[in-house]
Amino acid sequence: MSTTAGERVRAVARRDGVRWIEVVGRIGLATQGVLYVVVGLLAQKVASGRNDQADERGAIEAVSDQRFGRLLLLILTIGLALHCLWRLVLAIRGTPGDDDAGVVVKRITELGRGLLYGSFTFIAAKLLIDAGGNSGGSGEEQRKAVGTVLDWPGGKAIVVVLGLAVIAVGLWHTSELFTRKFVDDLDLDGHSEATRKVITALGSIGFLARGLVFCMIGWFLVESALDNDPNHTGGLDQALRRLAASNHGPGLLRLVALGLIVFGIYRIIEARVRTRSAVTNP
């Protein structure tokens, strides 16, 4: 009897543990979606020449500038912190199966995402505390980091590899337009066929837009290494501004910006319909 009672207690503990991870993960996904919607709206302004910062930092600052901005920023900060926590928990938990190379890569990827959203949380918290200060944009910080790496022995090779890795991630995202593997992580039972098609279309378009931006960012890294010039490097903001400056740039940027908005909307929906196993990595 005592053994059975102990097993029940452990089962309840495991279930409760998974439940809090699920709640944190869903809030984190929704927060990421909101961030991408705001970035997409800012990118539309870049295409119209009415804004020059369309990245995650710009999105966070845009939220703080709204009416009731401090309250919205507080909510966003909490959401970003939960997203960071969720990614770090996934990095620790790993995925079911043996600890093969694929699992190690997934753990490292989740760790990187966690650290990235940790930096976004820091930016939001700093804006909340002291109205932002003057710490510079994320693109400037990336250029400094790339410049430091380029000065290392073998630094050019390191930056090229990093750039190719980012391009590979971008190509994986764009491939979702054709493979639609992301649907496997969604629980669409009980939804109409029309709803399923809409969610699938939103995901396909969103992943394509996000993938294109990743490919551009990766190429800028490679370009920086080849030219030994960190000024070519930039994050999301740099990618969108360089796209706007290209031939037919404003029109292309509007399409990419729309795609980022679509991706944000998809993420918000995904926060509701993603399967528990895909959120918690049991």
Image (cartoon, rainbow, N blue to C red):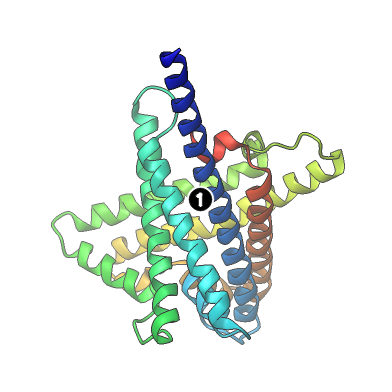
Q: In this view, does 49 lie to the left or right of 127?
A: right
Question: Can see residue 211?
Answer: no
186 w.r.t. 155: above or below: above
Residue farthest front in this picture: 1
Which quarter of the picture shows residue 261? bottom right
Q: How many labels does the image show?
A: 1
* Quadrant of the rendering where the N terminus is positioned: top left
Q: In this view, does 35 lie to the left or right of 132?
A: right
Q: Is residue 127 left or right of residue 36?
A: left
Q: Position of residue 156 (x, y in %)?
A: 24, 57
Task: Give the residue type at disc 1.
Answer: Gly
Residue at the spot 72% in from the left edge and 52% down from the top edge: 202
Residue 246 locus on image (x, y percent): 56, 73
Q: Is mark 1 on a helix, strand or loop?
A: helix
Q: Who's the residue at 42% across and 23% down the image? A: 97
Query: Is 184 or 118 nearer to us in this picture?
Result: 118
Measuring from the top left, give residue 140's x and y in whole percent: 35, 76
Q: Which residue is drawn at 39% across and 31% down?
A: 102
Residue 92 visible? The answer is yes
Q: Name the residue under label 1.
A: 170
Residue 25, position as x, y percentages in the image: 53, 48
Q: Is 158 in front, or is 26? A: 26
In the depicted structure, whether residue 38 falls above or below residue 127 = above
Give the residue at x 17% y 54%.
Answer: 154
Task: Place residue 276 in its image quadrant.
Answer: top right
Of residues 154 and 205, the one nearer the viewer is 205
Name the foreground residue: 183 vs 253.
183
Q: Seen in the image, is 97 located left or right of residue 255?
A: left
Bin the neighbour count of mark 1 within 10 Å (Cα to Cα): few under 14, some 14-19, many 20 and up: many
